[in-house]
Image (spheres, rainbow, N blue to C red):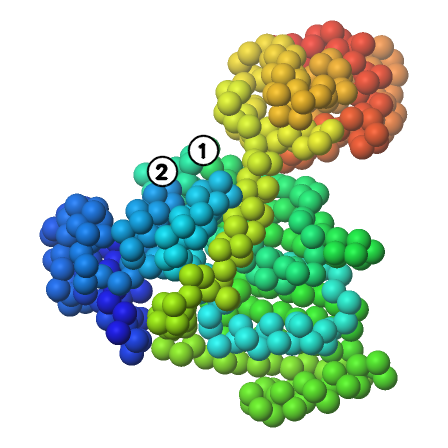
Amino acid sequence: MIRWGIIGAGNIAHRFAESLKHVEEGELIAISCRKMEKARAFAGEYPCSYLYDDGGYGLLENPDVDAVYISLPHGLHCEWAIRAMKAGKAVLCEKPAVLTTEEMDQISQTSRETGILFMEAMKTRFVPIHRLIIEIYEKGVVGQISRIETSLCNKSEQRAPDKYLYDPVQGGILLDCGIYCASWIDELTSGIYGSPEVRNADFRMEGEVESYAKSWLRYKNLSGDQELRVMLECAFDEKKPRMLTIRGDQGTIEVPELHRPETMEMTLSLTEKTREEEAWLDDLAATWKGQISWNENKQEKRYVFTLPYEVDDFYGQIRHFCHCLQEGRQESPVMSLEASRACIEIIEMIRERKPDISFHGISIQYNNRIVRINTDRNLLDFLDQKGNGSLELADHIHRFYQDKWGKPLEISRESLAVEILIHVYCDLVFDRIDRIVEKIGKPGRLLKDKLAFLKRATEVIDCGERAVDSNRIVFDQLAPFRQLLFLILGDKA
């Protein structure tokens, strides 16, 4: 029997304790938090012998505790996981296990030095449907994989600046929901593809954290002759279908509710090439009571498999961890130390693309050879109040880009300033140009039509160097006339 202690008594700890009641191999004996009143309330719901209000120190000193579940805020996971392992306690740590690959390396080193089991609580890998998804994926039923898409977007109604999600260090949606996406991505690419390259990343910011993130990654297989595109998308300010999608040249696999999966849907193109796969899937459907249907022209066959949880979505990972501990394992074969490192590495790579907001709160993202500026209220307020603020902003962008990439941004400050002003004030610019042209007896409509391609109100201003931005030449040509633009805009410039 594995005797458990929990450090942290929040909502996740309650869900863990409820699930643990159904695990024959484990029992809860200790709870630790910062207030005894809260510990007593927890023990009243989930009876246990030892209660602590010292944050975790006493629990780790208790010789009766075999394993600890860490359900503290993200930023405390590494510190307390290491303390627990050094105290001889096996550790099941709520996701994300760490904030950085450096922290994960520290945990791995401690686990290996002490010989103590550590596992990240990536529950999606331990639900019944997971085994079926991986079996079908590894069988290659849908053919050559060209794209994997993961999306976990929610619209939270309980967003508040004092919540951990808004902490500049441990907050943001990538560490919260994005880690589930990263886990699927790691599992579906590990051993087949090399390290990913971040092709692009889009963000929406609330304060200093990202409320939305979407990134496309590029993988090459280990032999280097095939490429895979992978999308990671997550949000706490927008609700979208929460889905894992695997696209192959013979079919598609879809997993709704990728963070709490119970169903897998698959579409197979029926050809001579897929006849063997069809027979195998039909047998699988008979075994697992899957539903089968065809499209109207009988060219595609659809399979739906549903495997409910055993108890709940926590049960599988707790039971697996208990078995690992009983077998004397130092790490899980399903959620290994290396897997946890790979997951946070994906998140870390995307987070490195987060916008800079150090300049008057303006959100600026620095990609290689491209700068993206959000046309939000902070930018508008700055430009409205500063007068010639576009040049000051351009100077800041050049300095920050040099520091980040170690090379200069090949866009002149004047060209950059002109692009910013035209995008932000496009309606005002063209209205005033039209009036001037009409006053000198020329039809203003002609000029408007010629420059209509510039008149686009965008949420993001993409300022790229000439080699990657076909519009750059336009702003370069307009740059010598920036004083005229300032004159046209008046107090706005």
- Counting from the top left corner in percent of width and height, residue 351 is at 55, 39
Q: Which amino acid does the dot numbered 2 rest on?
A: Pro
Q: Earlier in the sequence, mark 1 or mark 2?
A: 2
The answer to whether the residues at label 1 and label 2 have Cβ atoms under 8 Å apart is yes
Q: In which quarter of the image is the C terminus?
A: top right
Q: Give the left or right position of residue 111, taking residue 202 as reference.
A: left
Quarter-wise, where is residue 313 in the image?
bottom left
- Residue wearing tag 2: 161
What is the spatial separation of the Cα atoms under label 1 and label 2, in whole angstroms? 9 Å
Q: In this view, does 258 lie above or below 350?
A: below
- Counting from the top left corner in percent of width and height, residue 471 is at 81, 29
Out of 42 and 237, give the one closest to the viewer. 42
Q: Which amino acid does the dot numbered 1 rest on?
A: Gly
Q: Measuring 82% from the left and 18% from the top, which residue is drawn there?
A: 476
Q: Measuring 69% from the left and 76% from the top, which residue is drawn there?
A: 139
Q: Measuring 84% from the left and 30% from the top, which residue is drawn there?
A: 467
| Residue 238 in view of the camera | no
How many marks on residues? 2
Q: Give the left or right position of residue 249, taking residue 194 as reference.
A: right
| Residue 398 in view of the camera | yes
- Counting from the top left corner in percent of width and height, residue 423 is at 69, 26
Q: Is residue 277 above or below residue 259?
A: below
Q: Residue 24 carries which label?
A: none
Q: In this view, does 2 lie above or below 297?
A: above
For mark 2, give the secondary structure. Answer: loop
- Residue wearing tag 1: 207
Quarter-wise, where is residue 165 in the image?
top left
Out of 153 and 238, give the one closest to the viewer. 153
- Counting from the top left corner in percent of width and height, residue 363 is at 56, 29
